[in-house]
Amino acid sequence: MPPSSPEFTEMTEWNASGVEIQLSRDYEPTAARVPGMSFGTRRITGVWEPLVAEFYHLGVRHVRLAEPVDLCPDAGVVAARTLVLLRELTAHAISAEWVARCHDGCAGRGLFNHLYPPVRVDGAGDDAAVRGWRESFFLGMCVFRRGPGFTEVRDRRLGTLEMYTIDEPEHRAAIKKLVDGVPAGRLPAAVRQELAEARLIAEQAGHLWWLPTRAYRWPSPALSV
């Protein structure tokens, strides 16, 4: 991708969007206050997948997000990027303390219920959305794993298991781009439609991003996934 191309500019702006987080070795407040447990506050940018993996290996097990996160399709770049970050944190079983915002009822549709749940959802009218989110959540609710020549998705966000085996080359190439987020116009229309109908992608801030979390470890009992 040449530096002068529109796609390069769009992706540079996307990855440059910073998120402020507090990092800790423990999610329990008393334990988190023990000297040596906090990693302090950081403003992070870039590609989340390797960065979150680095946090995990350093011993980070809990993060706190400084700003509320919009869930709706008209969310800005920072909110969209923060949701992608939450996907990666959830994949590594790093708990997150955060506040969601919703003005169109999307919080109750379950699209993001596989992400570590927020402490509250502002603008939702009542706490039913977050209560259902917290009660239904478990690690591995919507996961994907790659095999030779295919990608498998196992999704229980709606309560029953939906399983997809994706082996079409065009779809697999699209998923590789979607993990970090890709400008909406860069995805083939047919692929975009099929993934959207399966509720496997979100569209925000002019970008599409992949919703399922990567299966870094298989949960126990495995039948829950």
Image (tube, rainbow, N blue to C red):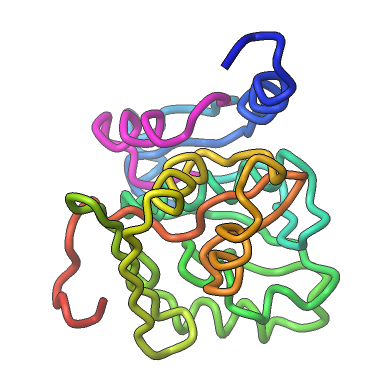
Return the residue nearer the eye: 102 or 3. 3
The quadrant in which residue 2 appears is top right
In depth, the one of 221 and 159 nearer the eye is 159
Camera-side residue of 32 and 198: 198
When the figure is inspected, residue 206 is found, relative to residue 22, above or below; the finding is below
Residue 48 is one of the magenta-drawn residues? yes
Q: Tell me if residue 28 can be seen.
A: no
Residue 10: name its quadrant.
top right
User: Between 218 and 35, which is closer to the camera in this rendering?
Assistant: 218
Horizontal placement of 117 versus 188: left or right?
left
Q: How many marks?
A: 0
Residue 57: x and y in percent read 24, 32
Q: Residue furthest top?
A: 3
**Residue shown at 43% from the left, 89% from the top:** 159
Range shown magenta: 44-63
Residue 163 seen in this snapshot = yes
Q: Residue at x 42, y 42 (%)?
A: 176
Q: Residue furthest bottom?
A: 160
Q: Is residue 198 above or below residue 217?
A: below
Residue 63 x/y as whole percent: 47, 44
Quadrant containing the C terminus in the rendered view: bottom left
Residue drawn at (54%, 47%) of the image: 84
- Name the spot of residue 1 as percent of width and height, x first: 57, 17
Height in image: 56 above or below 31? above
- Residue 110 located left or right of residue 150: right
Q: Measuring 49% from the left and 46% from the top, which residue is drawn there?
A: 174
The x, y position of residue 93, in whole percent, is: 32, 54
Magenta stretch encompasses residue 155: no
State whether residue 6 is above or below residue 74.
Answer: above
